[in-house]
Image (cartoon, rainbow, N blue to C red):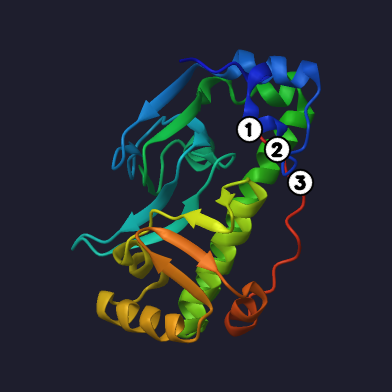
Amino acid sequence: MYVRCAACPLRLKPVFVQKTEQEVALIEEWKSDHLRLSEGTEFIHPDQSRSELYTLFAGWAYRYKELSDGRRQILNFVLPGDLIGLQSSMFGKSFYGAVALTDVELCQLPRRKFRRLFERMPELAYDVTWLGSRSESVVDENLLTAGRRGAAEKIAALFASLYKRAETLGLLVDGVLEMPLTQQHIADALGLSLVHTNKTLAKLRAQNLFTLAEGQLVVKNLRSMSRLAQHFEEDIAPRPII
């Protein structure tokens, strides 16, 4: 089912800056398709040329880079409202891959129309630039986590960040987040071995900071978890959505 931008329920969430009717109409004109992809589908390939831009409408995804021997680094996890694929549109090819972590829905935005935004609607072009900068800041934080935080701090920072982001999107139900990450995903995102990830998760559970069972995450003390991780995000301000 094609979802029209003017009827998009995602746009109504308080975490997103509201658009004018003219801006929404232009985004609707830009959008070429509403895709539904199954879990595990790679919709952007490393070194892919002329890939499209996407806004994640529903589900979870992640961006990654991989070494020739198969070792993988997850760059960041993508949640609804996030823009994916800007790098390829700017540089002609993608330097990373993007994979559906769950079944997902994507709003497809053809790269060939991207430059027209700067001519027809500079405000929307600025929003795209803002979203690209925000994505870079998330990767910067993840680099700090991978490079300088200890194992327990890494997992605490990741869980705290995802929990806060999910809360703003209304993804928590009675404090429970359906989180589709496996221990391998966590290890690949944080630069840990699978064994170290497993042992560290057990230690953190023993501290009663969170519960994680059957894909359901409940953070019992977000402040203590943030303090452990030295991860003190400001309140997430309303942001653009394309």
Q: Residue at x 57, y 60 (%)?
A: 163
In the current view of this chain or complex, which residue is farthest to the front? Answer: 174
Say which amino acid is labelled 1: Leu
- Look at label 2 and name its amino acid: Lys
Query: x and y percent of residue 28 in the render?
Result: 63, 16
Whole-number angstrom distance, CA of label 3 to CA of label 1: 13 Å
Q: Which mark is residue 171?
A: none
Task: Say which element carries label 3.
Answer: loop
Residue at 41% x, 35% y is 104
Mark 1 and mark 2 in contact? Answer it, CB < 8 Å. yes
Relative placement, left or right, of 121 versus 58 is right
Q: What residue does disc 1 label?
A: 10
Q: Which residue is mark 3?
A: 238
Report x, y in % for residue 229. 58, 80
Label 2 neighbourhood size at 10 Å, few (<14), some (14-19), many (20+)? some
Q: Is residue 22 left or right of residue 99?
A: right
CB atoms at circles 3 and 1 under 8 Å apart? no
Mark 3 surroundings within 10 Å by alpha-carbon count, few (fewer than 14), some (14 through 19), many (20 or more): few
Q: Tell me if residue 58 can be seen.
A: yes
Q: Earlier in the sequence, mark 2 or mark 3?
A: 2
Label 2 and label 3: CA atoms lie apart by: 9 Å
